[in-house]
Amino acid sequence: MNYWLVKSEPAVFSWERFVKEGKAVWDGVRNYQARNYMKNMCIDDLVLFYHSNTGKEIVGIAKVIKETYPDPTADNIKWVAVDLVPVSAFKKFVNIEQIKINIKLKDLLLIKQSRLSVMPLSEEHYRALCKMGL
């Protein structure tokens, strides 16, 4: 199993909307590195959902239910999408300030490459972040 973090602006696609809709086509990614990470997503991989720009916090856990396929919003087949479903909300949202001061998370890509919208997590990072939020 792999672990991931995806970012979305809450004004564009919030956790609340995700839960209400029950499923999301994770499309619109136009960064090559993020796209390459998405190509490694597998069914049942767990995904942390991060509100970017407003909030800057992890708010819940999702799961991959469909592996990469051509992004329906793209004009070029090189871009991909995956399907996600919500699993559970964090009881306590984990904000970027809390993440930055946690020594166990010093190598987290969210800190090192903060502009990426999709990134892998080690199992250790995933567990540490879940412990902070659940």
Image: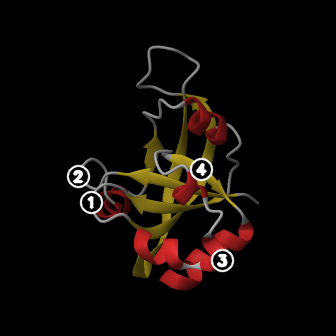
Marking on residue 104: 3
Tell me whether the residue at label 4 lies in contact with that at label 1, contact meaning CB atoms closer than 8 angstroms: no
Query: Is the residue 7 above or below the residue 105 in the image?
Result: above
Asked if the residue under mark 4 is in contact with the one under mark 3, i.e. CB atoms within 8 Å, the reply is: no
Residue located at (44% from left, 68% from top): 58
Q: Which residue is mark 1?
A: 54
Comparing 70 with 118, the one in front is 118
Q: Amino acid at mark 2?
A: Ala
In the displayed structure, 68 sits above or below 48; it is above
Disc 3 secondary structure class: helix
Given residues 109 and 118, the one toward you in this image is 109
**Is 8 in front, or is 61?**
8
Label 4, secondary structure: give it.
strand
The mark nearer the N terminus, 4 or 1, is: 1
Decide which of tag 1 and tag 3 comes sooner along the chain. Answer: 1
Give SS at disc 2: loop
> Where's residue 93, x and y in %?
39, 77
**Labels 4, 2: front one:** 4
Q: Amino acid at mark 4?
A: Met
From the image, tell me which residue sits under label 2.
11
> Is 50 above or below relative to 103?
above
- Give whichever of discs 4 and 2 has the lower sequence position: 2
Relative image position of residue 104 (x, y in whole percent) = 66, 77
Badge 1 local density, few (<14 within 10 Å), some, or many (20+)? few
Question: Looking at the image, which residue sits at the far left?
Answer: 11
